[in-house]
Amino acid sequence: TPITYGLPEGGALESPDIEGLNYQLAPYTENNDLRIENEGEAGEATITFTEEENLEALYLLVTSGSGSSTITGTINFSDATTQAFTSVSIPDWYNQISLPYVVTDIGRGSIPDDALQTQNGGPRIYQLTMQILPDNQNKMVSGITLYKEGSGIFNLFGASGKITADCIAPSNITNTALSANTLSFSWEA
């Protein structure tokens, strides 16, 4: 009987939530994810991107095994500055949905009996969105440094990004009612 689940043959995945956001998995014939195991211990990895871009958001294709993982780290820019992020929880690939997922019900193999296992609701690969601060959107993203804390086995399968628009959106928009028919707006360019 043909298998009706699993990852796509060519490794191309599309975000179900963001139109035009795509990922390309590395070939299945070789190691194809960044895995920070060290269960119960810390682990660190730096990833350098081959294509640098100015980004509004960085999207990571992630999952965790043997329980959820917690990561902290930095988004690295080509001018040697960074943007920190702290204590981001990556859910276990089975039965935990705290992030949107890109693919679910992909199945897994059992080493002891060489059987294929499926379960509705897992395993999943999730999409982690990391917003780039407005002050950093005009900088080239050159990579990320990840630090896994505590338990769980963190896995990173890919990264993608939303390129900064030619005109960056204003931030801190506020308004004040001056009268029943008049508003005053202010913002940071």
Image: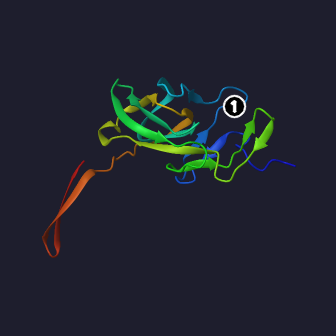
The residue most toward the bottom is 180
Q: Secondary structure at mark 1?
A: loop
Residue located at (56% from left, 35% from top): 158
- The image quadrant of residue 53 is top left
Residue 137's x, y, as percent? 35, 39
For label 1, the crowd category at 10 Å Cα-Cα, with few meaning under 14, some 14 to 19 and many 20 or more, is: few
Residue 89's x, y, as percent? 46, 41
Residue located at (21% from left, 58% from top): 174
Q: Which residue is mark 1?
A: 27
Q: Along the line of sight, which residue is nearer the eye, 96 or 177?
A: 96
Asked whether residue 163 is in view, the answer is no
Coloration of the structure image: rainbow
Residue 20's x, y, as percent? 55, 49
The residue most toward the left is 178
Circle 1: residue type:
Pro
Residue 46's x, y, as percent? 47, 24
Q: Is residue 157 above or below residue 172?
A: above
Q: Along the line of sight, which residue is nearer the eye, 5 or 41?
A: 41
Asked whether residue 113 is in view, the answer is yes
Q: Is residue 170 left or right of residue 87?
A: left
Badge count:
1
Q: Is residue 144 left or right of residue 106?
A: left
Residue located at (65% from left, 42% from top): 12
Q: Along the line of sight, which residue is nearer the eye, 11 or 40?
A: 40
